[in-house]
Each structure stands twice: as structure tokens, then as C-alpha cells.
Image (cartoon, rainbow, N blue to C red):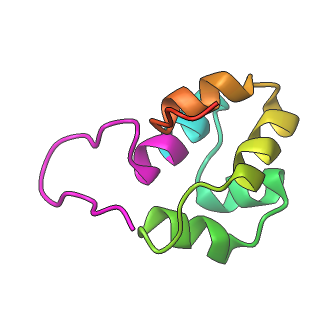
Amino acid sequence: MMKIPRGRGALPENYPNGFLDSVIREQQLKNDAELSRVLQLAPSSISKIRHGRAEVSAEVLLRVHEAFGTPIAELKRRQGSTTH
């Protein structure tokens, strides 16, 4: 499990919050609840990612890709993945 730094300042984009925030910002969504509706994921799934209890899974990447057309390679870059 990834440790999320505490304190002031923006988190790097490769942290779960940074990834979720980048999708919300790019797609001009209001919040996590709207993101969960668009991705057809339970709000608890987004919450678990947000609070570091779950990682951004391949399923989440695929749902973001399908909902918004963002290339998988770009999504993997945003989450800091080095696997292909």
C-alpha cells in the first residue's frame, strides 16, 4: 500500500488523490460522487482509492478510458505506472 504524505501542498499526480483529482479536473466533474456515477463505480471504491486503502486498478483505468476516451498509456503515466 502506498503511503500518502501529509501536510500542505499539492500531491504529485502519481498519488491516488492526484490521479483522481486530475480526472475530475480534466473532465470538469464536480466531485468524487459525480466521478463514481460516470464510471459506474460504487462511491466506496473511489473513497478507498482516495484514502489509500486501494490502488487504482486496471478496471478503474479501463472505465476512465471508456468513459472519457483518455488513452490507457496517458492514464498509466498519470498514475506513475512503469508497466506496459
Q: Nearer the viewer, residue 43 or 54?
A: 54
Q: Position of residue 50 (x, y in %)?
A: 47, 63
Residue 81's place in the image compared with 58, above or below, is above
Identified at 71% across, 44% down, the residue is 61
Magenta residues, start to end: 1-20
Picture quarter with the N terminus = bottom left
Whether the magenta-drawn stretch holds residue 13 is answered as yes
Q: Position of residue 65 (x, y in %)?
A: 79, 34
Picture quarter with the C terminus = top right
Q: Position of residue 34 (x, y in %)?
A: 71, 55
Q: Position of residue 72 (x, y in %)?
A: 72, 29
Identified at 53% across, 69% down, the residue is 54
- Decide whether the magenta segment is chiefly helix, strand or loop: loop
Q: Residue furthest front?
A: 83
Residue 49 left/right relative to 29: left
Residue 6's place in the image compared with 18, above or below, is below
Identified at 75% across, 72% down, the residue is 42
Q: Residue furthest left?
A: 7
